[in-house]
Image: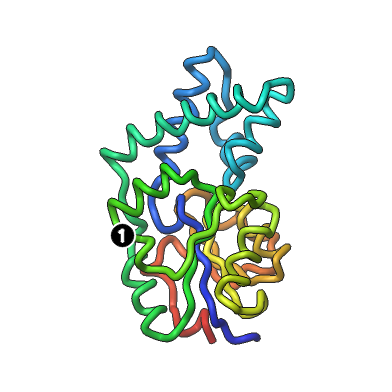
Amino acid sequence: MTTAQALLFDLDGTLIDSMPHHHEAWVGWHGRRGLEIDADGFFISTAGRSNAEILADMFPQASAAELDAMAHEKEALYREIAARELALIRGAHDFLERARAAGLRLAVCTASTPENMALAFARFGIDGWVETVVSPADGLRGKPHPDIFLEAARRLGIAPEHCIVFEDAPLGVEGARRAGMRAVALTTTLPAAAFENYDNVIAIAADFDGLDLAAIAA
């Protein structure tokens, strides 16, 4: 097995326990429009994708300005909730500190918006834990496209096969697979069964306290 040189972390549901808040925001957003939502199915099909991609599929006839306004409304709902309730995933800070002390290169690879990232970074200082943050705000496609992961590897100067991705969503794990990267799946949002068909998954855990850094990076 190829030794790891870099660890790439999703943000929502991986470093921060935000997915319940995004879930609540999407349900509220649909409710405002009188739209029905299969909340569980919606998450499985959209987690890791950018709002622009999600909403373009939902409203193919909408203009770019309309899509942007809808995305801003949903994210404003999320931030109202997150400002009060957002927390870290158990063990996240300690795990990243140990990884950095071990000489591993670190990045955040997220579909989050700049405003949402700013909220999490201001609250927890996550941007200071890593060397770079990559997102669709950089003009890249969201997951399951591999773009965000490949750009992080490029910035860090590490070959994809030496990168390990940490994700809580199947689309993120698929993005890692397409990038030629192994992945660690956290069951913070979905059960382990959601990741059983991905041959690039090397470990599954409930949170970072359940992960062995030495074994993963070996």
Q: Secondary structure at mark 1?
A: loop
Q: Is residue 124 above or below residue 155?
A: above
Q: Is residue 193 above or below residue 160?
A: above
Count of numbered circles in the view: 1
Quarter residue 80 falls in: top left
Q: Position of residue 86 (x, y in %)?
A: 31, 45
Density class for disc 1 (Cα within 10 Å; few <14, some 14-19, many ≥20) is: few
Closer-to-camera residue (186/149): 149
Which residue is tagged 1?
125
Quarter residue 57 falls in: top right
What residue lies at 54% left-to-right and 12% top-to-bottom?
Answer: 34
Q: Position of residue 184 (x, y in %)?
A: 55, 67
What residue lies at 48% left-to-right and 30% top-to-bottom?
Answer: 72
What residue lies at 47% left-to-right and 26% top-to-bottom?
Answer: 73
Q: Is residue 80 left or right of residue 142?
A: left
Residue situated furthest top in the rendering:
34
Image quarter hosting the C terminus: bottom right
Image quarter hosting the N terminus: bottom right
Q: Position of residue 217 (x, y in %)?
A: 52, 82
Closer-to-camera residue (8/133): 133
What residue lies at 57% left-to-right and 71% top-to-bottom?
Answer: 155
Give, as a three-letter code, the residue at label 1. Answer: Gly
Q: Position of residue 98 (x, y in %)?
A: 36, 79
Q: Is residue 218 above or below residue 198?
A: below
Q: How is the image coloured?
A: rainbow
Q: Is residue 189 above or below residue 146?
A: above
